[in-house]
Image (cartoon, rainbow, N blue to C red):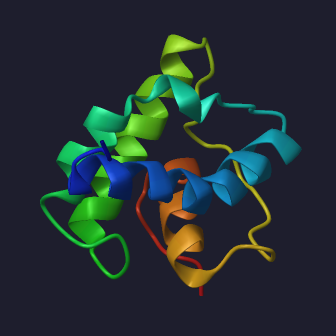
Amino acid sequence: MSPPDHLARAQAVRSDLAPVAEALEQCGAAVILETIPDRALAAVLMSATFTGSPALAHKLVRRIGDAAYAQGIDLRGIVCDHDDLRPDQQRIGFMCLCPTGKLAA
């Protein structure tokens, strides 16, 4: 039996978040995104599509930030190079790293 559609989508999003996790790790803030449960990601995904939604990006950023904080990592104020990330990954990663919410030019 396959997982419900929203859980399958949540599992697929993990691969999109992987480059964000790698970028965080490169700047010394390794975050184990696996600690964010699929059901939590699924709840976020049910409210909007993954790309193109600032509200969704904010929710994912909050989840990433919570997971990092639970691991003793404070992501606020960290600056990271996003050259290897796609625009949707950049937005999520940049908002995560720069709490002002300003997007890279």
Tell me if residue 6 can be seen: yes
Is 41 placed above or below 57 here? above
Residue 83, percent across and down?
Answer: 80, 77
Q: Where the N terminus falls, by quadrant?
A: top left
Q: Residue at x 68, y 46 (%)?
A: 21
Foreground of the two, 64 or 15: 15
Left or right placement of residue 41 versus residue 71 in this view: left
Foreground of the two, 102 or 55: 55
Q: Where the C terminus falls, by quadrant?
A: bottom right
Q: Residue at x 23, y 53 (%)?
A: 6
Left or right placement of residue 64 versus residue 90 in this view: left
Q: Residue at x 71, y 59 (%)?
A: 19
Left or right placement of residue 20 versus residue 57 in this view: right
Q: Residue at x 41, y 62 (%)?
A: 101
Tell me if residue 27 can be seen: no
Left or right placement of residue 7 versus residue 12 in this view: left
Picture quarter containing residue 15? bottom right
Is 85 placed above or below 12 here? below
Foreground of the two, 35 or 63: 35
Picture quarter containing residue 100? bottom left
Picture quarter containing residue 48? bottom left
Residue 52, percent across and down?
Answer: 33, 82
Residue 24, percent across and down?
Answer: 73, 45
